[in-house]
Each structure stands twice: as structure tokens, then as C-alpha cells.
Image: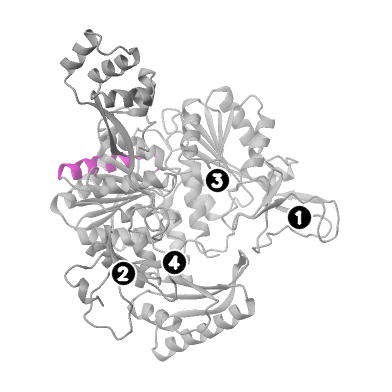
Amino acid sequence: MYQTQLHGIISVGDRVLVPFGNKKSLEEGFVIELKEKSNYKVKDIISIQEGIKLTKENIELAKLMARRYFCNISDCIKLMLPPGTSTKLMENRVKEKSANFVYLIKDIEDIQEDIDNNVIKSEKQKRVLNFLMQNDDIQTVDLEILTDTTSVILKTLEKKGYIEIISKQVVRNPFINKKIHKSDNLILNEEQQLAFDNINKSINENYFKEFLIYGVTGSGKTEIYLQLIEQVLKKNKSAIVLVPEISLTPQMVDRFISRFGEKEIAILHSKLSIGERYDQWNKIKKNECRIIIGARSAIFAPVNELGLIIIDEEHDSSYKSETNPRYNAKELAKYIAKKNNIPLVLGSATPDMVTYFQTQNKNIELLQLTKRANKSTLPKVEIVDLKQELANGNRSILSVKLYNAIEENLKNRKQTILFLNRRGYSTFVMCRDCGYTIKCKNCNITMTYHSKGNKLKCHYCGYEQKNVTVCPECKSNNIKYFGTGTQKLEQEINKLFPQASTIRMDVDTVTKKNSHEQILQDFKNKNIDILIGTQMVVKGHHFPNVTLVGVIAADSSIFSDDYRANERTFQILTQVAGRAGREKDSGKVIIQTYNPDNFAIECSQKQNYDIFYNTEIELRKQLKYPPFCDIISIVLTGEDEEKIKTTSNKLYKRIASFIKNNNLNILIYKPLPCPIDKIKNKYRWRIILKCKLNNKVINLISTSLENLDDKKTRIIVDTNPANLV
């Protein structure tokens, strides 16, 4: 409802200030609908805030998301606001950045005459004026450095009427240190051209269609993206390119800047400062750039005249948010593409099984690239059985085969990537006398030992403590470190190959801004011998001199408590193998495992997605897993375990009753503790539903959650969660 005095002034989308509850302070809200009357007693709107306003499309999308992802509409709206502006009224907001610029206000001829006639006696003043007569649009700080003067000199010249100092907005530029050389379109091979032509038809004829470019690693998917975007720009439209994570962004951005120039591109990802993200958002809003590259939240960018959406590495789980709202960027991209009558292009060498299933049902058009674009061959992949290595007396972190291959690579001055999907030094610490393992005091999870700082760290809540040397349970000194992380691997490699230069890339080494980009540049440009890393080194990177990839432990993902364990194992092994031999020199991949007969590992050796898919899809069908159903996880969390258990059972009975009474085809599983049953001092119980998500199911769940009378329990509903933990 709106007040009479706001009639004709307030409109849908306005940001307003309102009193909320018994609080004296005001809260922000957005007008999403106007009504003449209300059945409730409502408070007056205090004021309308200038600046930010939601569009009709924003509100429609927020409503859809709130229903689809079981969350508040306000949480969805926050994703659509400029970065740094969703703070409360009295807090500091991100603002446009300004700087002082110096301009001449006197004619150059008059200034030159004053200099020649010694009207201006100060040498420093003369230097400033001579510089400004040859250079325009310069900031005061730069002018002071270039002319070796101070602000006092500039103020004097301003008082004399020679110059004026004006404050102007400046854009924080995340590309400022990039040195990029211009590149031209490459000639597409037959497969690339066919893919381009099919998608370009949709661009030219303005209709929605979803495509999957399924191409082996190095098959030239990015070149197709670049040439499609060129067509979109010719139509004066914009393109959104989503990439899965920040480690992939630098190389992708470089490719785009070299082709289209810096001014056409905006980037949006978490490693930018909040001010940089704000300025990038504003550039997009003002239609100053037409290519938007970013992680999943870039799908909410305020793009004008959208002509194309591309989702690279579409199989990556990071497109699914694991925090509220738990949206899937691929689902929203499809919705937005349909609304705009434009193509949605997905790309991957190891497609998500649900996506590939849709190509088999003809809901998505499949475009295959079977050859590497530069005619290089796929690397040879070898499997090493670590059980046999142990039987032969080798207790080293490296198999004999991998050790020899690294040594050979060093002799030939070629680069090596070693992949281990665990950070830290040791994965858990245990007492060998009583079996006690050191767990986080806040989470029911083992702590990881980090040699830097000699500390134990929980990778779920971030809690740290000093290393344990005496068992807290039996007081024994027989403490043993089990498992290997990237930190320990780096230490071992330095011992085994002291002549080699190494660099490590994981969450612990990319804490500073641009550090991920610097590591990749150093590896490539300084020709560092060995890059050690986690998933960050796996996807999308092109290093011409890398001819060897070693997978230290391929088993870490096989036995996870998730139906996608085999799929993720196959994907990550195939992707990491794809980093080797991408130029004229042939590549070799060595995968170390205790389970050489696992079919996901066998398929990754053959780099054969089709065999893997055909086997795995039959298992999914028998066990009723996606794509044959949706999995809905309802997690209840709180500090009182008994209360959580009671509420979980109450909710289960309520949903089960709805299912039975309405004769719905839904499988429901009784509530149980989550695989990780305690995180950040909160106990966690879970109910699982298997069904096809539709309006009936959404209504059932929403109704079941009403009036549970347990305000201390938080309930999280997640459809097809990225991780079932």
C-alpha cells in the first residue's frame, strides 16, 4: 500500500526507507507492487531514495527465484544491485571515485608570452605550464610527479588564473597493468565453422536456442566464442560470458582484450575490489561496454540489448550457489536467454551429464569438436597402481614412473604440472596409540595440518589452533600425520629435485589480490619448471611448454558421499590431462591411484566421454538420480541437537502426509544427520526428496515449512545441491 501523499510519485522499483518492527533505525526496501488497500496495519514510507531503481525485469526475476529456490525475495534483489550498495542507510556505501584534474584556462599564446617576458619567474611554474601546453587531461598527482613540483605550485598558478583544478569521476581500472597485444580472427576448421554457423543463425534471426559445444581439450571453443561475439557487436548488442572461477578469468580476459580492446570489456568477479566491481557495474549500466565476463553472479549484470550468453566449462559445480539464494546460474541464463530471444551457448570437454542427456533428447543442440584446433594430438595417459608401488617397496609420494618422467622433462627443459586436490601439509592428524583424530571444536570434521605456522586448520569454518604433539585422549607422544596436501607435495618435490624451480597454486597462495594471475604469469613467462596445485590449475589454461601432467592421488573424489563422485572424478582427470601437449610437442599424463580398475579412471585414461556417459547414465536411471529426477535437500540446522531432531521428524511427517493425501510421485527419505553433522557449532539433519520439481512440489514444500513453531532452527531447501554434505 502507498500513502496518499506519495500518489503519482512512488513507482514499482523505487528504493525506500521504512520503519521496521520496534527498531528506531530505518530499513531499506524496494517497491515491488502497488496496492490501493491492505488487510494489515502498515507503517508509512519515510522517503524515496534516489539513484538505484529496480527494473520490471529485475522484479520478475527476483519473484521467480524466490519461489524456485525457496528464499526471500529481498535476498534475490540484493544480487541485482550495484556492488557495495546493499548496505544499510547509515553505513558507508561504495561511491564513484573522483580525482583532481588540471586544465589550462589561459590561451597558450598568452602563457608563452608571459614565460618569454619573464612575467613568470619560478622555474617550477614554468615547467608545469610548458608540460600542460603539450599534454591535456592529467591528474594533479601525476602532474606533480612528472614535473617534480608540489600542490603549492599548482595552487599558486590557479590563483594567478593560468590553470583550474577540477574534480572528476575516474573509473577504477582492473586492466591497468595488463600488456595485451592485438589478435586477429583465426581460420576456423570445418567442425568449428559448423558450430559457428549454427549458433550465428540464431543470433541473426533473433530466436532462442540452447547449444552445447562439446569439444576435446584444446579444440578451439574460445575462438568460436570470440567470433560469435563479433557478430553480436555488429548488431549493436551485448554478450555475457560466464566462467567458472577466478583462476580461469585472467587468461580468458586476456584473449578477449586482445581481440576486442579494453574499452569493450567489463569483468565481474570476487577478486576485484568492491570499488572496482562498482565501477565495472556502472560501465555496463551506462552501456559503455558490451562484453561482460565474470563468475556466476555476472548473470545479473545490468546489460543493455543482450544478444548472446556463453557459459564456458558448463559442467563446473561453481555455477550452483551454495549460499542463500541457492540459485543455478545455468537455469537463470536459460530463462534470460528465452526472454530476450537469443542463443545460450554451453561449452565443455566433459559436459555435465544432465546437459548431455538433454542433447540426446534434442532439447539442446549438440555441436561436437573432435580434434584439437592446432592439430596437436591428445596426450598419452598412463595409470600407475600405487598398491603395486607399495608392494615394490616404494613409499615415496611419487611413483617410479612419474619420478622418471619429471626428471626427463627437466632435462628437456619442458614444464610439468602436478595436480593434487588437497591443500595443506597433511590431511589429518591421528594418535597411533589410541586412534584419536584431531577434529575442529566447531565442526565434526578432521583438521588439516599446515606446516607454515605449524598449525591445524579447519577448512569448513576457518578455526585454527596450534599443532598437537601430545594426544589429548591418552597423552601419548606418538602423533602421526596422514595424507598429503599441496604444501607437503611442494616440500617433497623440492627435496627430490633441488635443481628445479617450483611454484604452488591453491587457496593458501592466492589470498592477495591478483595473486592467482601472478602465479600463472610467472609459471608461463619465467619458465618455472613445476607448477603444483589444486583444481585451480586444471581448467582452461594454455601453457605451450607443458608436456607432462602428474596426478598424485586420483582417489580423493571417488569415495565421496555423492552420486556424482564418478562423474567428477572423470571430469577433473580429463580436464587436468588436457593441460599437456597443447602445442607441437606431444604430452604425457601419469595418473597415480589405488583403484586402477575404477571405470571413471579407466575412461579418463581413454579420454572417452561417450563410454563413460553410456555406463553412468544407466546407473543413474536404475538408482533414480538426475537427470531422471531432481534431488531436493532439506537441511535443518541449529545449536540444540534434540530440537533439530524433533523438528526434522515433524517436518518429515507433514511432507509425507501431503504426498500420500495428494497421491504424488515423490520419494521421501526419513531424516538423518548430514554426512558432516556439525559445522560452526550447529548440528545438521537432513530430509531428502526425489521427484521432478514442478509447481505442485514447490507448493507442497512451501506449505510444509509454514508454522513449524521453531524459530531457533534454520531450514535450508536446496534443489540439486552442488554438494550433498
Of pointers 4 and 2, the one earlier in the residue sequence: 2
Residue 258, horizontal then vertical, whole percent: 30, 32
Of pointers 2 and 3, the one earlier in the residue sequence: 2
In the picture provided, is 262 more to the left or to the right than 578? left
Q: Nearer the viewer, mark 1 or mark 3?
A: 3
Callouts 1 and 2 close, C-beta under 8 Å:
no
In terms of secondary structure, what is the magenta stretch mainly?
A: helix
For mark 4, give the secondary structure. Answer: loop
Mark 3 sits on what residue? 507
Residue 383, horizontal then vertical, whole percent: 58, 44
Above-or-below relation of 202 to 663: above
Q: Nearer the viewer, mark 4 or mark 2?
A: 2
Mark 1 sits on what residue? 430
Q: Which of marks 2 and 3 is in front?
A: 2
- Distance CA(mark 1)–CA(mark 2): 60 Å
Place residue 506 in its image quadrant: top right
Mark 2 sits on what residue? 46
Amino acid under label 4?
Asn
